Amino acid sequence: MTAQLDSPADLGRAAEPHPHHARRWAILGVLGLAQLMVVLDATIVNIALPSAQVDLGFSNDNRQWVVTAYALAFGALLPLGGRVGDLVGRKTALLVGLIGFAVASAAGGLAADYGVLVTSRAAQGVFGALLAPAVLSLLTTTFTDAKERAKAFGIYGAIAGAGGATGLLLGGVLTEYLDWRWCMYVNVLFAIAATIGGLTLLHNQRHDGPRHRLDIPGTITVSAGLFALVYGFGNAETHAWGNPAVWGWLAAGATLLVVFTVIETRVAHPLIPLRILLDRTRGGSLLTVLILGVGMFAVFLFLTFYLQQNLHFTPITSGVAFLPMIGALAVTATTATSVLVPRFGPRPLVPVGFVVAAAGMLWLTDLDLGSTYAAAILGPLMITGVGFGLAMAPAMTSGTSGVHAGDAGVASALVNTAQQVGGSIGTAVLSTIAANAATTYLAGKTPSPDIIAAATIHSYTTTFAWVAAFFAAGAVISGLLLRSGPLQTDPEAAPTAHM
């Protein structure tokens, strides 16, 4: 892949000292805090749901929408949020996102009924869609040295990968010792700290070229298409796959995304320039992040159920049980990528990471009624964490590598979108697989407490086997698509690929 600068003006800008360079590591701390808040919110509310349901009196059928409302708004609006950051400035997008997220979180914590809680969760998703791309694009444009960028993305990848498990731990602590509402209020504290840091450290960055108009047709079709996909997969948790509420929405989403692709080839200023997607390495990275999103759901959700329902762990103990995986992920992401990515690129790391994570998931298929945490869970968790660390950080680095600075926001949004859509797919597909596995196990047997417990464990181990297969496919896909060699790291480089 050959880097090309758009014009002599780009050469001049590339030579100018970067206003964030001297404060880059302090800025990384601010960006990491903001990203942690967004990632935590995907799981912290799960722990609080039972208490919130008792407090506000909503039904089991309505319970899933407290989670899904966030995913719907976040996933559907991410591409728009990324482009808005490119147009109005990434500091502005970050600060507006932080303040809006804090206000929405406070409203959710104060919610007196179900409607207010769901509305606040959707509002969190809206501002998260503005915030998350700004974080990743600021990270991309702040770190220009190859080795430093790899280290920064290693830290970012560790936060993105471990944030879900951290949310389970923090949610357990807050729910058990304070109140479920603090799972919402805690975001206000994160947002205040990150806002102060952003105001102090950041300069506003936006594309210096001609001001582009926002692609309204593209915005409407991609947002509606992503909404339909996430909504369809969300309905699959409570409806059969043959129900129009599932396949109808999925078909509508796929159709809208095809229409969006056609629009992007014809408009002067596309919301998502197709050159970003058509690059082999970036396309492979987006698929990697999507597949990892599918698999990480299985680890957090089904293993949390096993710990609490079968081993009778408390919410806090369940969160602590994931700490070895978090440690393995963080160490792998921050050290391996800082040493290997600048020298070899992502291709050797991502496929190996998938294979290692698949091995960890296969080990978890040995769980049974007599399994213990130390003998049957600790080892697989650490191995899976190593695999996630090897795959996640390099994929996120290469997913934004080589894009022109004016496209950094939308490229960053695509990485976040892939992770969010992957999680939504994982929620629906793996929940359905688990339910079918339990039903098949119980067929012809007389239900008893032991039989039902065994059927439940069988449903978990079946999903772990499927995730191992997904990861094996991810190893093949990433091995074929990702290029060998160091990544393109010039933040002003045009995303021009030479095959």
Image: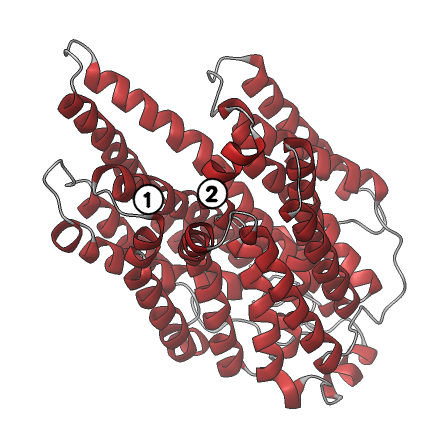
**Count of residue discs:** 2
Any part of residue 216 in sight: yes
Q: Which residue is mark 2?
A: 46
Q: State the SS at label 2.
A: helix
Residue at x-position 32% and y-position 28%: 434
Asked whether 37 or 170 is in front, the reply is 170
Any part of residue 138 in sight: no
Q: Position of residue 327 (x, y in %)?
A: 33, 67
Q: Determine which quarter of the picture holds residue 452.
A: top left
Residue at x-position 48% and y-position 82%: 147
Q: What label sits on residue 304 in the rendered view?
A: 1
Left or right of residue 81, residue 249 in this image: left
Q: Amino acid at mark 2?
A: Asn
Task: Assign the C terminus to one quadrant of the image.
Answer: bottom right
Q: Position of residue 83 (x, y in %)?
A: 76, 55
First of labels 1, 2 by sequence position: 2
Task: Assign the N terminus to one quadrant of the image.
Answer: bottom right
Q: Is residue 75 above or below residue 401?
A: above
Other residues around mark 2 within 10 Å, as few (<14) / some (14–19) / many (≥20): many
